[in-house]
Amino acid sequence: MADFEAIYQVVALIPPGKVSTYGAIAGYLGSKGGARLVGWAMNASHGQSSIPAHRVVNRNGVLTGKNFFGGNRMQELLEAEGLTIKNDQIQQFSNHFWDPSVELL
């Protein structure tokens, strides 16, 4: 089972303009069913500027963690990186998806 620090190391590698999912990060770390743990880690990371938690979304590109950012901050951060968000969902999600299992060979 991955720990928060291992999760943070992967999330820190997501480039601007890209997003990953809770499940993709968990799978990369060898914890296929650990998406919830990744979510907990993202919630606990607020206040750590080196962790781009806004780049982690659910498997459908929905900003499920937005409530932990306050207001529309998560959406604003992603839009500043060039993503389009409508109804809390990333448009053209597949074009922005960053899969650590592919990118971090």
Image (cartoon, helix red, strand yellow):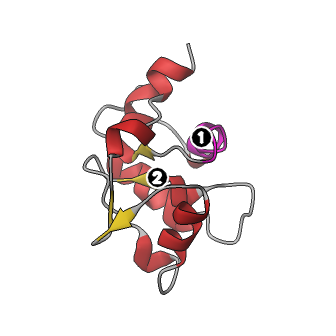
Residue at (51% x, 84% y) in the render: 70
The range drawn in magenta is: 7-16
Q: In the rendered image, which residue does mark 2 sit on? A: 56
Residue at (48% x, 77% y) in the render: 68
How packed is label 1: few (under 14 Cα within 10 Å), some, or many (20 or more)?
many
User: Where is residue 45, by image quadrant?
Assistant: bottom right
Mark 2–mark 1 distance (CA, rounded to whole Å): 9 Å
Assess whether residue 55 is covered by the magenta stretch.
no
Mark seen at residue 93: none
How packed is label 2: few (under 14 Cα within 10 Å), some, or many (20 or more)?
many
Q: How far across and how far down the image is residue 74, in percent?
A: 51, 70
Q: In the rendered image, which residue does mark 1 sit on? A: 14
Specify whether 50 is left or right of 68: right
Specify whether 50 is left or right of 96: right
Question: Pointer 2 and pointer 1: residues touching (CB < 8 Å)?
Answer: yes
Determine the secondary structure under disc 2: strand
Which amino acid does the dot numbered 2 rest on? Val
